[in-house]
Image (tube, rainbow, N blue to C red):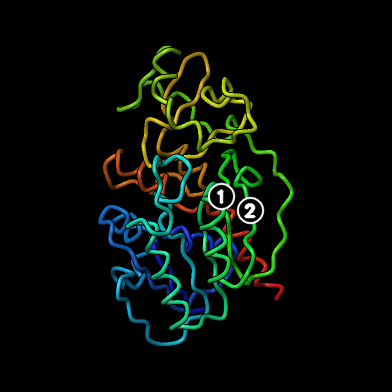
Amino acid sequence: MNVLSLFDGISCARVALDRAGIEVNAYMSAEIDKNAIKVSEKNYPDIIRVGSVVDLSVEGEIDLLIGGSPCQDLSIAKKDRKGLEGNRSGLFWEYVRIKKECNPKWFILENVASMPKADRDIITREMGVEPVMFNASLVSAQCRKRLFWTNIPFSLPMDRGILLKDILEVDVGAKTGLYKVGRDVGRRLVDGHRADHDTSVPYERRIETREDDKCGTLTSVAKDNLVVGERIRKLTPIECERLQGLPDNYTEGVAMTHRYKCLGNAFNVDVVAHILSALKTN
């Protein structure tokens, strides 16, 4: 399979293809973030780097076009969001252009479920298919509601029942860069970001994720990634990797701040692998 991954980030789509057991002939990555590229190169040195999606010209046959266009201007966590007219989320139109040019057999587009209905309708019109809301909580310990527009026919999986306690590291207190703080400080750290979490969960539980529960949506800002046991601490990069379905230390090799950012911007691997696995029966 020849794959073109737009907004490729740390190449979670490649991990998902491997996990789904789909053979990759060529995997082309369109990405410009130097830290994300460094992580991707460490794990998959064979990936073909094609640079920015802007003005990208595609040659050859593409079997799968996949990507999650930037969500910053669409997410409910963004004040005064400009939607698809924003500089970042407006890059969706590059996905549309490239899709028309390469006419892939299969395509997947991912974005946040909290986007305005008007923008959702525009994307649906351009993709030609209705989106499916797939919450990563079904396959991980993370609540992460995302919309997927795809022509791959798939059904949602049963909840695997994975909780935060199932992915936590042990004895993390001595690790460099981690800290434990009191509850009041913890509340200030997450205040203002609660809208991106599952609003069906009471506010007190949303800001204090417990080990016997799911955690909220990982973001690109490390301060959002908190867990409550006896006290409050940050999730480790390895725990965030596990929440995104990645192998331990997948993002090792860049600064911790960049690891958190890359992971917050990533696909959940097991979500995408589940969708891709439907190709083996179609």
Residue 32 place in picture, x, y as percent: 28, 61
Which image quarter: residue 19?
A: bottom right
Mark 2 sits on what residue? 133
Mark 1 sits on what residue? 113
Instruction: Tell me the residue at 51%/24% (across/down).
Output: 207
SS at mark 2 in the image: strand
Instruction: Tell me the residue at 41%/27% (across/down).
Output: 234
**165 or 113, which lies in front?**
113
Q: Amino acid at mark 1?
A: Ala
Which image quarter: residue 42?
A: bottom left
Residue 192 place in picture, x, y as percent: 42, 29
* Quadrant where the C terminus is found in the figure: bottom right
Note whether residue 91 is visible.
yes
Q: Tell me the crowding category of disc 2: few under 14, some 14 to 19, or many 20 or more residues within 10 angstroms, Cα based.
A: some
Which image quarter: residue 205?
A: top right
Instruction: State whether residue 27 is above or below residue 158.
Output: below
Instruction: State whether residue 178 is above or below residue 132.
Output: above
Residue 23 place in picture, x, y as percent: 54, 74
SS at mark 1 in the image: loop
Circles 2 and 1 in contact, beta carbons < 8 Å: yes
Q: Tell me the crowding category of disc 1: few under 14, some 14 to 19, or many 20 or more residues within 10 angstroms, Cα based.
A: many
Instruction: State whether residue 35 is above or below residue 143.
Output: below
Q: Amino acid at mark 2?
A: Met
Using residue 129 as the reference point, say whether residue 63 is left or right of it. Answer: left
**108 or 238, which lies in front?**
108
